[in-house]
Image (cartoon, helix red, strand yellow):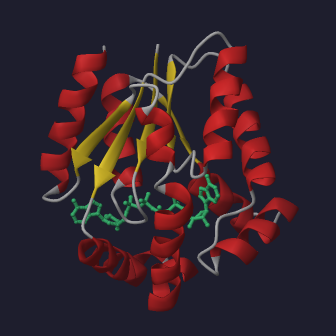
Amino acid sequence: MINLVLFGPPGAGKGTQAERIVEKYNLHHISTGDVFRANISAETELGKLAKSYMDQGQLVPDEVTIKMLISEVDKNPEAAGFIFDGFPRTKPQAAALDEILESKGTSISSMLALDVEEDELKDRLKKRAEVSGRADDADPEVIQKRIDVYKKETAPVKDFYSEQGKFTSINGMGSIDEITNRLFEALDKLS
Ligand code: B4P
């Protein structure tokens, strides 16, 4: 069973690449950003709460995000493995994920971290803003805030997996196909 953390700053290509990995390796895809956005569209209480943080470029609080993640994992007991996209984004989330998987007799196989230059991230998000309708993509100040929050709160999660010998950096610059090939190469070494 492969359980993968697909990691990277906002706009690194996590969502884009996760779709391709899911297709090839038959993993169940959980994107915390997508689950929040579905709740925002459905105007649930969780959605209202998440929106108040996401529109500011802030992380949704750990307690809420972890609870939601557990429920997503529990909904899929038949999954042959998971790809976690956008989770964990803090060290407490990483520790919670280890606990959840341990309780199910499994563990994270690897973190694949997409490495992308900051100017390129801003460029991709600016382009996505034209089509996504996402409030958090439309405002350059919010994009900068998301990148700053990533550096301060999320980047240290790499150390969590490095210490377990599970961290792999992937060059996230170049065409979508080139990056997919790098990810497949790393994944083939795991399976
Ligand atoms: P996410 O939905 O995870 O948003 P993201 O990090 O901005 O997107 P992603 O990295 O998946 O984008 P992609 O590269 O695919 O999170 C949104 C918000 O939700 C967070 O800011 C936070 O508030 C909240 N949240 C989510 N998870 C949380 C958690 N665990 N804890 C707390 N809060 C949480 O796409 C970027 C664009 O680039 C696309 O348009 C794509 O087409 C393009 N692109 C991709 N690869 C490219 C390439 N190689 N070349 C050119 N363009 C490319």
Quadrant of res 34: bottom right
Quadrant of res 135: bottom right
Q: Position of residue 82 (x, y in %)?
A: 51, 28
Q: Position of residue 80 (x, y in %)?
A: 51, 16
Q: Position of residue 33 (x, y in %)?
A: 58, 57
Q: Is residue 152 left or right of residue 54?
A: left
Toward the viewer: 43 or 157?
Answer: 157
Can you tell me which quadrant of the image ligand 1 is in?
Answer: bottom left
Q: Is residue 76 visible?
A: no
In the image, residue 37 above or below residue 84: below
Labels in figure, total: 0
Q: Is residue 110 left or right of residue 99?
A: left
Query: Which residue lies most toward the top here?
Result: 105
Query: Which residue lies most toward the right here?
Result: 45
In the image, residue 191 above or below residue 143: above
Q: Residue at x 23, y 19 (%)?
A: 189
Q: Is residue 11 left or right of residue 84?
A: left
Q: Residue at x 56, y 46 (%)?
A: 87
Q: Position of residue 62 (x, y in %)?
A: 74, 53
Quadrant of res 110: top left
Quarter of the image where the C terminus is located: top left
Q: Residue at x 54, y 78 (%)?
A: 136
Q: Is residue 42 visible?
A: yes
